[in-house]
Every structure is written in C-alpha cells, then in structure tokens.
Amino acid sequence: MKPLMYGHIATALIVMLCFSGCTAPAPTIPPTSPATTIQTAQPTPMTTQTSPPALTGVTWYLVAFDKGGSSQSVLPGTGITAFFDPSGVMSGSAGCNQYTASYSGSLNGLSIGAPASTKMYCESPAGIMNQETLYLTTIQGASAYSISGNILTVNDSGGKAILTYSTVPPYEMTPAPLTGTMWYLNSFVDAKGNFWTPGKANPISLQFTADGNVSGNAGCNSYSGAYTVTGNSISISGFAVTLMYCGEPGVMDLESTYLAVLPMMKVYRISGNELTLSDGTGKVSMIFDTTK
C-alpha cells in the first residue's frame, strides 16, 4: 500500500510544478525606440564658367579692319598681330614691319599711342604696304574694346568697330575657282603708283568664263573682252565698253583708269576668296574678292 501512495503523491507534485511553470508571467521586453534618420546635407552644385581670354598676354591675329567705313579682310599671305604686355607696351607685326606702341587700358577703355616701326619695304603681296600704313593709323583711333570668346573687337570713340582680332591665326580657305566666280574689285595700284578703291555705291566686277571670255561692270559701264591663261600667266584684251555717263564724282575717272590697267595684268594668284592680278613686277596690281 505505501509504494502506491508515494506514487500518487509524486504524480501530484509533478502536476503542480507544471502548472506553476505554465502560469509564470512572460518576461517583459523593453520597447524598441524608432530608428532615427540622419539628414545629410547635400552639396550645392557649382557652375564653372570659362573666362574669356584677357587682353594682355595673348597674341591676337588681325582678322578685319575698317577701311573707308566698311570692314576689310586682311590680305591673303599677310599676317598682322598684336600683343599687349602688362607693362603697357603693344607690339607685333604690321604685315611687313615690326611695330611697338604704348597703350593704356582700364575696364573696357583702350588708348593706343603713335607706333614706332622698322623700315623694311615688302613688294608682295600687292597692297601690303598700303595695308600696313592703314593698320598703323587705325590702331591710334582705339577708344574701347570687348572680348567675346576668342574674338577681340576694338571700337573708336563713336562705338564703331575698327579692328577685329582672333586668338586663332587666319586659315587658308579652299581657293575659289578663277572661272565662274564673280570677282569684285577691292583696290588697285596704277602705273603711277596711285592707290584706287571703288565706293560701295559703284562696285567694279570681273568674271571669267570657261570659253575664254571676260566681262563685268567698270563702275558705270559694262565691258567685255577675251582672256587666255597659261599656268599662272594671264592675258586680257579686246575690250568692248558701253557708253553711259555717270555723274557721281570720281566714278568716270576710276572707270577709265581701271579699264586702262586691266589689260596690263600678266600674272594671277588666288588665295582663299581673293584674286590678285599683277603686271609681273608687283608695281601695278589689282586685288579682287568674292564680297560685293
């Protein structure tokens, strides 16, 4: 009897222990704090701008200059430069001779003094000495300047552009063909060394055709003739001219001189869009381009 009673007591104790364990309160888990988001400041994008070249410390190549109120391109085969030293000295090549001049600049103002130059004489290309003289005179009219990209523009006191430079040297364009191109007279030097240039109101033109004919307008009258070419040699002759009279001062004198000089041309050369005719010595010459 006793073993059985002890067995019942043991069983009761086990049941009580299980009940006590099952009803024990669950451990308390501390609440989790919400995650904190840290805001990182974003850098502000910076815009980098390319500054245009400064006036000083750059070699500027002349592209065009004012001539008689209109823009004139630099003669093919010539190079005109300007270098502005920070010390106030401007120097460069005027096409034939080297030159120097004093200058002063403040903000966009510019003043250039009378230049001093070497004394060489260049015979070619035709018109180079006249161009040099005009350039060295023109720079003294500088009053202001502006730089846009790689272009430097110099203005006179009235705000008119008188000089245009670039940081890039002028390039040689594909030569325009002799025939089929309408050439317009830029300037010419007659047998006496006189320099002539037509006005915008009375342009002088010249055109060669593939069948050996030449024609154009001499400023007032139309003219026509014949030509032959062998290599760079040219012969022009046999002019027929209309007989109109134009009353503008100087037009008829310019026309008659032009028609007298044209048959004297013996050599031609084309550089880019410019045609140069010469008597073979360089003393008498004509310069045409494709711009009216």
Image (tube, rainbow, N blue to C red):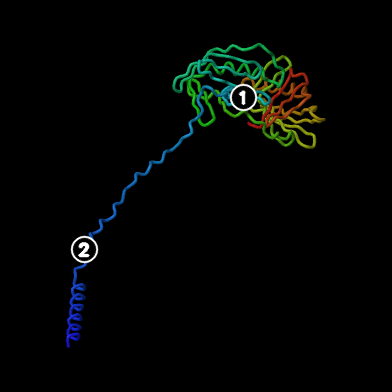
Closest to the observer, 157 or 182: 157
Near-viewer residue (112 or 33): 33
On the image, the x and y values in percent for residue 31 come to 23, 59
In this picture, is 208 found above or below 20? above
The kind of residue on which mark 1 rests is Gly
Above or below: residue 44 compared with residue 15: above
Where is residue 28? Give x, y as percent: 21, 63
Question: In the image, what residue occupies the spot 34% across and 46% down?
Answer: 40
Amino acid at dot 2: Thr
Label 1 to label 2: alpha-carbon separation: 106 Å
N-term mark: 1 or 2 = 2
The residue singled out by tag 1 in the image is 199
Residue 28 marker = 2
Name the foreground residue: 159 vs 220.
159
Horizontal side of residue 173 vs 234, given as left or right: left
Examine the image and state in which quarter residue 125 appears: top right
Q: Quadrant of the N terminus?
A: bottom left
